[in-house]
Amino acid sequence: MATTILIIGAGAAGLMAARELSARGHAVTVLEARHRAGGRMHTIQPDGFTVPVETGAEFIHGKLPVTLALLDAAGIGYTPVQGRMIEVRKGRWHRQQHFVEGWSTLMEHLQTVTEDMTVRAFLNKHFSEDRYEELRRSVQRFAEGYDGADIDRASVMALRDEWAKEEEEQYHITGGYEKLVDYLYTQCVRQRCLLYFNSPVHSIRWQAGTVEVATTDGRTFAANKVILTVPLGVWQQPEPAIQFTPAISAQLDALRQMGYSAVIKASLEFKTPFWLEYERELGFLFSEEIFPTWWTQLPHPAPVLTGWINGPQAASFTQVLPDKMLQYALYSLAGIFGLPLVFLEQQLVGSQITDWGTDTWSRGAYSWDTLASRAARRLLREPVQDTLYFAGEALYEGAHPGTVEAALTNGLEVARKIG
Ligand SMILES: Cc1cc2nc3c(=O)[nH]c(=O)nc-3n(C[C@H](O)[C@H](O)[C@H](O)COP(=O)(O)OP(=O)(O)OC[C@H]3O[C@@H](n4cnc5c(N)ncnc54)[C@H](O)[C@@H]3O)c2cc1C
Protein backbone atom coordinates (compact mmCIF):
# COMPACT_ATOMS: atom_id res chain seq x y z
CA MET A 1 0.00 0.00 0.00
CA ALA A 2 1.31 3.49 -0.81
CA THR A 3 2.43 5.39 2.27
CA THR A 4 2.92 9.11 2.66
CA ILE A 5 6.49 9.85 3.70
CA LEU A 6 8.20 13.03 4.81
CA ILE A 7 11.96 13.24 4.44
CA ILE A 8 13.86 15.87 6.43
CA GLY A 9 16.97 16.92 4.49
CA ALA A 10 17.80 16.87 0.76
CA GLY A 11 21.41 15.67 1.06
CA ALA A 12 22.72 12.39 -0.33
CA ALA A 13 20.73 10.20 2.08
CA GLY A 14 17.48 12.18 1.72
CA LEU A 15 17.59 12.36 -2.09
CA MET A 16 18.48 8.69 -2.40
CA ALA A 17 15.64 7.64 -0.08
CA ALA A 18 13.22 9.96 -1.91
CA ARG A 19 14.21 8.56 -5.30
CA GLU A 20 13.79 4.96 -4.16
CA LEU A 21 10.51 5.46 -2.30
CA SER A 22 8.91 7.49 -5.08
CA ALA A 23 9.97 4.83 -7.60
CA ARG A 24 8.10 2.34 -5.41
CA GLY A 25 4.92 4.42 -5.67
CA HIS A 26 4.96 6.17 -2.27
CA ALA A 27 3.97 9.83 -1.94
CA VAL A 28 7.16 11.59 -0.88
CA THR A 29 7.68 15.13 0.38
CA VAL A 30 11.18 16.43 1.18
CA LEU A 31 11.68 19.39 3.54
CA GLU A 32 15.10 21.04 3.28
CA ALA A 33 16.35 23.89 5.48
CA ARG A 34 18.73 25.33 2.87
CA HIS A 35 17.84 27.01 -0.42
CA ARG A 36 19.47 24.13 -2.32
CA ALA A 37 19.80 20.35 -2.46
CA GLY A 38 23.02 18.43 -1.77
CA GLY A 39 23.76 19.21 1.89
CA ARG A 40 27.44 18.48 2.44
CA MET A 41 27.93 18.08 -1.32
CA HIS A 42 28.25 21.63 -2.59
CA THR A 43 30.04 22.61 -5.79
CA ILE A 44 30.40 26.31 -6.62
CA GLN A 45 32.43 28.49 -8.96
CA PRO A 46 33.40 31.65 -7.05
CA ASP A 47 34.89 34.78 -8.65
CA GLY A 48 38.43 34.28 -9.86
CA PHE A 49 38.16 30.51 -10.33
CA THR A 50 38.46 28.84 -13.72
CA VAL A 51 37.21 25.49 -12.37
CA PRO A 52 34.40 24.37 -10.06
CA VAL A 53 35.26 24.31 -6.36
CA GLU A 54 34.11 21.54 -4.06
CA THR A 55 33.41 23.24 -0.75
CA GLY A 56 32.34 19.91 0.80
CA ALA A 57 32.73 16.34 -0.47
CA GLU A 58 35.32 16.12 -3.23
CA PHE A 59 36.68 12.59 -3.73
CA ILE A 60 35.24 9.16 -4.36
CA HIS A 61 37.39 7.06 -2.05
CA GLY A 62 37.68 3.88 -4.13
CA LYS A 63 35.44 1.79 -6.36
CA LEU A 64 32.35 2.55 -4.31
CA PRO A 65 29.41 0.60 -5.71
CA VAL A 66 26.41 2.86 -5.07
CA THR A 67 28.14 6.09 -6.07
CA LEU A 68 29.69 4.67 -9.23
CA ALA A 69 26.46 2.94 -10.28
CA LEU A 70 24.64 6.29 -10.03
CA LEU A 71 27.35 8.11 -11.99
CA ASP A 72 27.27 5.44 -14.69
CA ALA A 73 23.48 5.55 -14.91
CA ALA A 74 23.62 9.35 -15.18
CA GLY A 75 26.44 9.33 -17.75
CA ILE A 76 28.63 11.46 -15.44
CA GLY A 77 32.38 10.95 -15.84
CA TYR A 78 35.03 10.61 -13.15
CA THR A 79 38.82 10.53 -13.30
CA PRO A 80 41.44 8.94 -11.06
CA VAL A 81 43.30 11.37 -8.84
CA GLN A 82 47.01 11.47 -9.61
CA GLY A 83 50.21 12.81 -8.13
CA ARG A 84 52.82 12.07 -5.54
CA MET A 85 52.40 12.25 -1.80
CA ILE A 86 54.89 14.59 -0.22
CA GLU A 87 55.63 15.11 3.43
CA VAL A 88 57.27 18.35 4.56
CA ARG A 89 58.95 18.09 7.93
CA LYS A 90 61.14 20.75 9.47
CA GLY A 91 61.38 22.45 6.08
CA ARG A 92 62.51 19.29 4.25
CA TRP A 93 60.52 17.62 1.49
CA HIS A 94 60.18 13.82 1.54
CA ARG A 95 58.61 11.80 -1.23
CA GLN A 96 56.29 9.20 0.29
CA GLN A 97 55.36 9.08 3.93
CA HIS A 98 58.25 9.46 6.31
CA PHE A 99 59.15 6.24 8.16
CA VAL A 100 58.20 6.46 11.83
CA GLU A 101 59.82 4.21 14.41
CA GLY A 102 57.36 1.69 15.82
CA TRP A 103 54.73 1.88 13.04
CA SER A 104 54.86 -1.87 12.27
CA THR A 105 54.74 -2.70 16.02
CA LEU A 106 51.72 -0.39 16.24
CA MET A 107 49.92 -2.30 13.49
CA GLU A 108 50.73 -5.62 15.23
CA HIS A 109 49.40 -4.39 18.57
CA LEU A 110 46.27 -3.08 16.88
CA GLN A 111 45.51 -6.57 15.58
CA THR A 112 45.58 -7.98 19.11
CA VAL A 113 43.07 -5.53 20.61
CA THR A 114 40.01 -7.46 21.80
CA GLU A 115 38.47 -4.86 24.07
CA ASP A 116 37.76 -1.39 22.77
CA MET A 117 39.44 1.67 24.30
CA THR A 118 40.20 5.19 23.19
CA VAL A 119 43.16 5.78 20.88
CA ARG A 120 44.84 7.78 23.66
CA ALA A 121 44.42 4.91 26.16
CA PHE A 122 45.83 2.48 23.60
CA LEU A 123 48.89 4.66 22.98
CA ASN A 124 49.43 5.13 26.72
CA LYS A 125 49.18 1.39 27.27
CA HIS A 126 51.58 0.23 24.56
CA PHE A 127 53.61 3.23 23.40
CA SER A 128 54.22 5.47 26.37
CA GLU A 129 58.03 5.41 26.14
CA ASP A 130 59.93 8.47 24.96
CA ARG A 131 61.20 6.73 21.84
CA TYR A 132 57.59 6.51 20.60
CA GLU A 133 56.94 10.23 20.85
CA GLU A 134 57.01 10.69 17.10
CA LEU A 135 54.81 7.64 16.60
CA ARG A 136 52.23 9.01 19.04
CA ARG A 137 52.26 12.33 17.19
CA SER A 138 51.86 10.59 13.82
CA VAL A 139 48.89 8.54 15.03
CA GLN A 140 47.24 11.68 16.39
CA ARG A 141 47.92 13.62 13.19
CA PHE A 142 46.51 10.85 11.05
CA ALA A 143 43.43 10.28 13.22
CA GLU A 144 42.70 14.01 13.32
CA GLY A 145 43.64 14.86 9.74
CA TYR A 146 41.87 12.06 7.93
CA ASP A 147 39.07 10.95 10.26
CA GLY A 148 38.64 14.24 12.08
CA ALA A 149 38.67 12.20 15.29
CA ASP A 150 39.56 13.34 18.80
CA ILE A 151 41.93 10.64 20.13
CA ASP A 152 40.65 11.17 23.68
CA ARG A 153 37.25 9.84 22.55
CA ALA A 154 37.89 7.86 19.34
CA SER A 155 37.52 4.06 19.30
CA VAL A 156 40.80 2.31 18.58
CA MET A 157 38.96 -0.67 17.09
CA ALA A 158 37.14 1.53 14.58
CA LEU A 159 40.37 3.24 13.59
CA ARG A 160 42.10 -0.12 13.26
CA ASP A 161 39.40 -1.36 10.87
CA GLU A 162 39.78 1.78 8.81
CA TRP A 163 43.58 1.67 8.70
CA ALA A 164 43.59 -2.03 7.79
CA LYS A 165 41.86 -1.22 4.48
CA GLU A 166 43.87 -1.40 1.29
CA GLU A 167 44.83 1.96 -0.14
CA GLU A 168 42.41 2.46 -3.04
CA GLU A 169 42.45 4.69 -6.06
CA GLN A 170 40.47 7.90 -5.57
CA TYR A 171 38.39 9.77 -8.14
CA HIS A 172 37.19 13.27 -8.94
CA ILE A 173 33.76 13.70 -10.52
CA THR A 174 33.92 15.64 -13.78
CA GLY A 175 32.09 18.90 -13.05
CA GLY A 176 31.92 18.07 -9.34
CA TYR A 177 29.46 16.42 -6.96
CA GLU A 178 26.90 18.98 -8.13
CA LYS A 179 26.34 16.74 -11.16
CA LEU A 180 25.29 13.87 -8.92
CA VAL A 181 23.04 16.17 -6.86
CA ASP A 182 21.36 17.47 -10.05
CA TYR A 183 20.80 13.93 -11.31
CA LEU A 184 19.20 12.71 -8.07
CA TYR A 185 17.13 15.86 -7.70
CA THR A 186 15.82 15.66 -11.27
CA GLN A 187 14.88 12.01 -10.83
CA CYS A 188 12.99 12.79 -7.63
CA VAL A 189 11.04 15.57 -9.36
CA ARG A 190 10.26 13.34 -12.35
CA GLN A 191 8.91 10.74 -9.96
CA ARG A 192 6.62 13.39 -8.47
CA CYS A 193 8.36 13.95 -5.15
CA LEU A 194 7.54 17.33 -3.67
CA LEU A 195 10.63 19.21 -2.53
CA TYR A 196 10.39 22.33 -0.37
CA PHE A 197 13.53 24.42 0.17
CA ASN A 198 14.02 27.09 2.89
CA SER A 199 11.96 24.82 5.14
CA PRO A 200 13.77 24.14 8.44
CA VAL A 201 11.82 21.66 10.54
CA HIS A 202 11.57 22.48 14.22
CA SER A 203 9.00 20.14 15.72
CA ILE A 204 7.39 16.76 15.17
CA ARG A 205 4.22 15.44 16.82
CA TRP A 206 3.86 11.76 16.28
CA GLN A 207 2.17 8.50 17.18
CA ALA A 208 2.48 5.11 15.54
CA GLY A 209 1.62 5.55 11.85
CA THR A 210 1.12 9.34 11.93
CA VAL A 211 3.42 12.37 12.03
CA GLU A 212 2.81 16.09 11.90
CA VAL A 213 5.90 18.07 11.09
CA ALA A 214 6.13 21.85 11.58
CA THR A 215 8.62 24.20 9.93
CA THR A 216 10.03 27.34 11.56
CA ASP A 217 7.71 29.54 9.48
CA GLY A 218 4.61 27.77 10.81
CA ARG A 219 3.73 25.43 7.94
CA THR A 220 2.69 21.88 8.88
CA PHE A 221 2.95 18.65 6.90
CA ALA A 222 1.24 15.36 7.74
CA ALA A 223 2.36 11.86 6.76
CA ASN A 224 2.49 8.23 7.88
CA LYS A 225 6.26 8.16 8.39
CA VAL A 226 9.21 10.53 8.59
CA ILE A 227 12.86 9.95 7.66
CA LEU A 228 15.29 12.23 9.51
CA THR A 229 18.60 12.79 7.71
CA VAL A 230 19.65 15.77 9.87
CA PRO A 231 23.45 15.65 10.44
CA LEU A 232 24.93 14.66 13.81
CA GLY A 233 26.35 18.13 14.42
CA VAL A 234 22.86 19.63 14.28
CA TRP A 235 21.47 17.04 16.74
CA GLN A 236 24.43 17.74 19.03
CA GLN A 237 23.74 21.46 19.48
CA PRO A 238 22.87 22.55 23.05
CA GLU A 239 19.30 23.34 21.97
CA PRO A 240 17.68 20.27 20.36
CA ALA A 241 17.33 20.87 16.61
CA ILE A 242 13.88 19.34 16.50
CA GLN A 243 11.36 18.96 19.35
CA PHE A 244 9.53 15.63 19.48
CA THR A 245 6.15 15.08 21.10
CA PRO A 246 6.17 12.58 22.69
CA ALA A 247 9.90 12.84 23.46
CA ILE A 248 12.39 10.26 22.18
CA SER A 249 15.18 10.82 24.71
CA ALA A 250 17.04 7.53 24.15
CA GLN A 251 17.53 8.32 20.44
CA LEU A 252 18.55 11.93 21.04
CA ASP A 253 21.05 10.80 23.71
CA ALA A 254 22.48 8.24 21.29
CA LEU A 255 22.97 10.93 18.62
CA ARG A 256 24.97 12.98 21.12
CA GLN A 257 27.34 10.14 21.93
CA MET A 258 28.71 9.69 18.42
CA GLY A 259 31.82 11.46 17.10
CA TYR A 260 31.58 14.21 14.49
CA SER A 261 34.43 16.17 12.94
CA ALA A 262 34.82 19.82 11.99
CA VAL A 263 36.56 20.77 8.73
CA ILE A 264 37.83 24.05 7.30
CA LYS A 265 38.64 23.93 3.61
CA ALA A 266 40.61 26.63 1.74
CA SER A 267 40.43 26.54 -2.06
CA LEU A 268 42.93 28.89 -3.68
CA GLU A 269 43.48 29.59 -7.37
CA PHE A 270 46.78 31.19 -8.43
CA LYS A 271 47.97 32.86 -11.64
CA THR A 272 50.47 30.04 -12.19
CA PRO A 273 51.07 26.61 -10.66
CA PHE A 274 54.26 27.76 -8.90
CA TRP A 275 54.56 24.39 -7.14
CA LEU A 276 55.62 22.71 -10.39
CA GLU A 277 59.12 24.06 -9.79
CA TYR A 278 59.25 22.05 -6.56
CA GLU A 279 57.51 18.87 -7.68
CA ARG A 280 56.02 18.34 -11.13
CA GLU A 281 53.76 15.54 -9.94
CA LEU A 282 52.52 17.08 -6.70
CA GLY A 283 49.36 15.32 -5.54
CA PHE A 284 48.97 15.53 -1.74
CA LEU A 285 51.18 17.40 0.66
CA PHE A 286 51.33 16.85 4.44
CA SER A 287 53.02 19.43 6.66
CA GLU A 288 53.19 20.81 10.18
CA GLU A 289 51.62 24.18 9.25
CA ILE A 290 48.26 25.58 10.46
CA PHE A 291 46.68 24.21 7.27
CA PRO A 292 48.66 20.95 7.40
CA THR A 293 47.21 19.16 4.35
CA TRP A 294 47.08 20.39 0.75
CA TRP A 295 46.31 18.90 -2.63
CA THR A 296 46.34 19.82 -6.30
CA GLN A 297 43.81 18.95 -9.00
CA LEU A 298 46.07 16.53 -10.88
CA PRO A 299 45.65 15.23 -13.56
CA HIS A 300 43.68 18.45 -14.21
CA PRO A 301 46.26 21.23 -14.68
CA ALA A 302 44.20 23.98 -12.94
CA PRO A 303 46.49 26.16 -10.76
CA VAL A 304 44.40 25.39 -7.69
CA LEU A 305 45.57 24.28 -4.25
CA THR A 306 43.15 23.05 -1.61
CA GLY A 307 44.04 23.33 2.08
CA TRP A 308 42.44 21.26 4.82
CA ILE A 309 42.18 21.46 8.62
CA ASN A 310 40.21 18.72 10.35
CA GLY A 311 39.18 17.54 13.80
CA PRO A 312 39.85 19.33 17.09
CA GLN A 313 42.23 21.73 15.36
CA ALA A 314 39.49 22.91 12.98
CA ALA A 315 37.08 23.25 15.90
CA SER A 316 39.58 25.55 17.64
CA PHE A 317 39.25 28.07 14.77
CA THR A 318 35.47 28.45 14.97
CA GLN A 319 35.58 32.12 16.03
CA VAL A 320 38.12 33.07 13.34
CA LEU A 321 36.83 35.09 10.37
CA PRO A 322 37.33 33.83 6.78
CA ASP A 323 39.80 36.64 5.92
CA LYS A 324 42.01 35.58 8.82
CA MET A 325 41.75 31.93 7.78
CA LEU A 326 42.81 32.95 4.27
CA GLN A 327 45.87 34.60 5.80
CA TYR A 328 46.62 31.41 7.75
CA ALA A 329 46.31 29.44 4.54
CA LEU A 330 48.80 31.73 2.80
CA TYR A 331 51.18 31.64 5.80
CA SER A 332 51.02 27.85 5.64
CA LEU A 333 51.96 27.82 1.96
CA ALA A 334 54.70 30.38 2.57
CA GLY A 335 56.15 28.04 5.22
CA ILE A 336 55.86 24.92 3.07
CA PHE A 337 57.37 26.43 -0.09
CA GLY A 338 59.72 28.87 1.65
CA LEU A 339 58.17 31.71 -0.39
CA PRO A 340 57.52 35.34 0.64
CA LEU A 341 53.93 35.99 1.62
CA VAL A 342 53.77 38.94 -0.78
CA PHE A 343 54.55 36.64 -3.72
CA LEU A 344 51.63 34.37 -2.81
CA GLU A 345 49.32 37.36 -2.36
CA GLN A 346 50.26 38.66 -5.80
CA GLN A 347 49.74 35.22 -7.32
CA LEU A 348 46.33 34.67 -5.74
CA VAL A 349 43.37 35.20 -8.11
CA GLY A 350 40.57 33.40 -6.28
CA SER A 351 39.89 32.14 -2.77
CA GLN A 352 37.11 30.29 -1.02
CA ILE A 353 37.20 29.48 2.71
CA THR A 354 34.50 27.10 3.95
CA ASP A 355 34.10 26.37 7.65
CA TRP A 356 31.68 23.47 8.07
CA GLY A 357 31.78 23.69 11.86
CA THR A 358 29.89 26.99 11.74
CA ASP A 359 27.46 25.94 9.01
CA THR A 360 24.02 26.08 10.67
CA TRP A 361 22.67 23.00 8.88
CA SER A 362 25.60 20.63 9.29
CA ARG A 363 27.69 21.95 12.24
CA GLY A 364 30.61 19.85 11.11
CA ALA A 365 31.77 17.53 8.36
CA TYR A 366 31.36 13.79 8.98
CA SER A 367 31.10 11.14 11.68
CA TRP A 368 33.77 9.09 13.41
CA ASP A 369 33.38 6.36 16.01
CA THR A 370 33.61 6.92 19.75
CA LEU A 371 33.42 3.99 22.17
CA ALA A 372 29.64 4.54 22.27
CA SER A 373 29.04 4.76 18.50
CA ARG A 374 28.33 1.11 17.78
CA ALA A 375 25.60 0.82 20.40
CA ALA A 376 24.20 4.21 19.42
CA ARG A 377 23.98 3.21 15.76
CA ARG A 378 22.32 -0.09 16.65
CA LEU A 379 19.56 1.82 18.46
CA LEU A 380 19.20 4.52 15.81
CA ARG A 381 19.01 2.07 12.91
CA GLU A 382 15.81 0.63 14.43
CA PRO A 383 12.76 2.65 13.41
CA VAL A 384 10.74 4.07 16.30
CA GLN A 385 7.34 2.34 16.13
CA ASP A 386 7.73 1.97 12.36
CA THR A 387 7.14 5.72 12.14
CA LEU A 388 10.37 7.66 12.85
CA TYR A 389 13.42 6.61 10.83
CA PHE A 390 16.89 8.06 11.38
CA ALA A 391 19.20 8.13 8.33
CA GLY A 392 22.36 9.71 6.92
CA GLU A 393 26.06 8.99 6.70
CA ALA A 394 26.41 8.59 10.50
CA LEU A 395 23.94 5.70 10.53
CA TYR A 396 25.78 3.66 7.91
CA GLU A 397 27.42 0.33 8.82
CA GLY A 398 30.11 -0.68 6.37
CA ALA A 399 33.54 -0.20 4.93
CA HIS A 400 33.23 3.45 3.84
CA PRO A 401 32.10 5.47 6.86
CA GLY A 402 31.79 9.24 6.73
CA THR A 403 31.41 9.39 2.95
CA VAL A 404 28.80 10.23 0.33
CA GLU A 405 28.71 6.48 -0.38
CA ALA A 406 27.76 5.92 3.27
CA ALA A 407 24.90 8.43 3.03
CA LEU A 408 23.60 7.09 -0.30
CA THR A 409 23.75 3.49 0.93
CA ASN A 410 22.00 4.31 4.18
CA GLY A 411 19.30 6.32 2.39
CA LEU A 412 18.65 3.32 0.17
CA GLU A 413 18.58 0.90 3.12
CA VAL A 414 16.04 2.98 5.01
CA ALA A 415 13.84 3.29 1.92
CA ARG A 416 13.93 -0.49 1.45
CA LYS A 417 13.09 -1.02 5.11
CA ILE A 418 9.91 1.00 4.54
CA GLY A 419 9.17 -1.17 1.49
C1 LIG B 1 34.48 19.42 3.93
C2 LIG B 1 33.93 18.06 3.66
C3 LIG B 1 34.65 17.20 2.86
C4 LIG B 1 34.17 15.92 2.60
N1 LIG B 1 34.87 15.14 1.73
C5 LIG B 1 34.30 14.00 1.31
C6 LIG B 1 34.89 13.30 0.23
O1 LIG B 1 35.91 13.72 -0.33
N2 LIG B 1 34.29 12.15 -0.17
C7 LIG B 1 33.14 11.68 0.43
O2 LIG B 1 32.63 10.63 0.00
N3 LIG B 1 32.56 12.34 1.44
C8 LIG B 1 33.10 13.48 1.89
N4 LIG B 1 32.50 14.22 2.87
C9 LIG B 1 31.34 13.63 3.59
C10 LIG B 1 30.04 13.70 2.79
O3 LIG B 1 29.87 14.99 2.26
C11 LIG B 1 28.87 13.36 3.72
O4 LIG B 1 29.11 12.11 4.35
C12 LIG B 1 27.51 13.25 2.98
O5 LIG B 1 27.37 14.25 2.01
C13 LIG B 1 26.41 13.32 4.03
O6 LIG B 1 25.15 13.20 3.43
P1 LIG B 1 23.84 13.17 4.36
O7 LIG B 1 22.67 13.09 3.47
O8 LIG B 1 24.01 12.14 5.42
O9 LIG B 1 23.87 14.58 5.13
P2 LIG B 1 23.76 16.06 4.55
O10 LIG B 1 24.38 16.15 3.22
O11 LIG B 1 24.26 16.96 5.60
O12 LIG B 1 22.19 16.27 4.35
C14 LIG B 1 21.35 16.58 5.43
C15 LIG B 1 20.44 17.73 5.03
O13 LIG B 1 19.58 18.03 6.12
C16 LIG B 1 19.35 19.43 6.09
N5 LIG B 1 18.85 19.85 7.42
C17 LIG B 1 19.55 19.94 8.59
N6 LIG B 1 18.73 20.31 9.58
C18 LIG B 1 17.49 20.47 9.03
C19 LIG B 1 16.20 20.83 9.56
N7 LIG B 1 16.01 21.11 10.86
N8 LIG B 1 15.15 20.87 8.70
C20 LIG B 1 15.30 20.59 7.38
N9 LIG B 1 16.48 20.24 6.84
C21 LIG B 1 17.56 20.16 7.67
C22 LIG B 1 20.70 20.00 5.74
O14 LIG B 1 20.61 21.30 5.23
C23 LIG B 1 21.19 19.00 4.69
O15 LIG B 1 20.89 19.42 3.39
C24 LIG B 1 32.94 15.49 3.16
C25 LIG B 1 32.20 16.37 3.96
C26 LIG B 1 32.68 17.64 4.20
C27 LIG B 1 31.85 18.59 5.02
Image (spheres, helix red, strand yellow):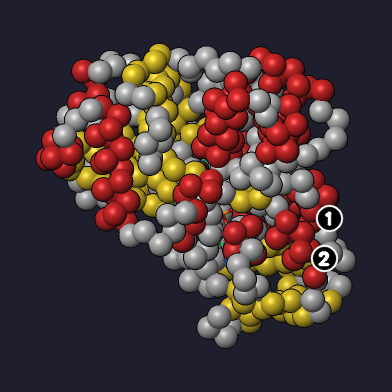
User: Residue 152 location in percent, x, y?
Assistant: 66, 45
Q: Secondary structure at mark 2?
A: helix
The answer to whether the beta carbon of the residue marked 1 is less than 8 Å from any atom of ligand 1 is no
Label of residue 94 in the image: none
Q: Residue at x 49, y 34 (%)?
A: 59
Q: Is residue 19 above or below residue 157?
A: below
Q: Residue at x 39, y 52 (%)?
A: 354
Quarter of the image containing the N terminus?
A: bottom right
- Which residue ends up furthest to the front in the rendered image? 130
Give the residue at mark 1.
379
Q: Residue at x 53, y 59 (%)?
A: 363
Q: Is residue 134 visible?
A: yes
Q: Secondary structure at mark 1?
A: helix
Dot 2 or dot 1, earlier in sequence: 2
Residue 289 lies in quadrant: top left
Q: Is residue 218 above or below residue 334?
A: below
Q: Residues within 10 Å of mark 2 (few under 14, many from 20)?
A: few
User: Residue 319 location in percent, x, y?
Assistant: 40, 62
Q: Is residue 387 left or right of residue 40?
A: right
Q: Residue at x 22, y 50 (%)?
A: 47
> Relative to the observer, which residue lies in front, 291 or 299?
291
The answer to whether the beta carbon of the residue marked 2 is less than 8 Å from any atom of ligand 1 is no
> Relative to the observer, which residue lies in front, 38 or 192?
38
Q: Residues within 10 Å of mark 1 (few under 14, many from 20)?
A: some
Task: Indicate the amino acid at tag 2.
Answer: Ala
User: Residue 34 location in percent, x, y?
Assistant: 48, 65
Task: Indicate the amino acid at tag 1.
Answer: Leu
Q: Is residue 71 left or right of residue 372?
A: left
- Which residue ends up furthest to the bottom in the rendered image? 218
Give the residue at mark 2.
250
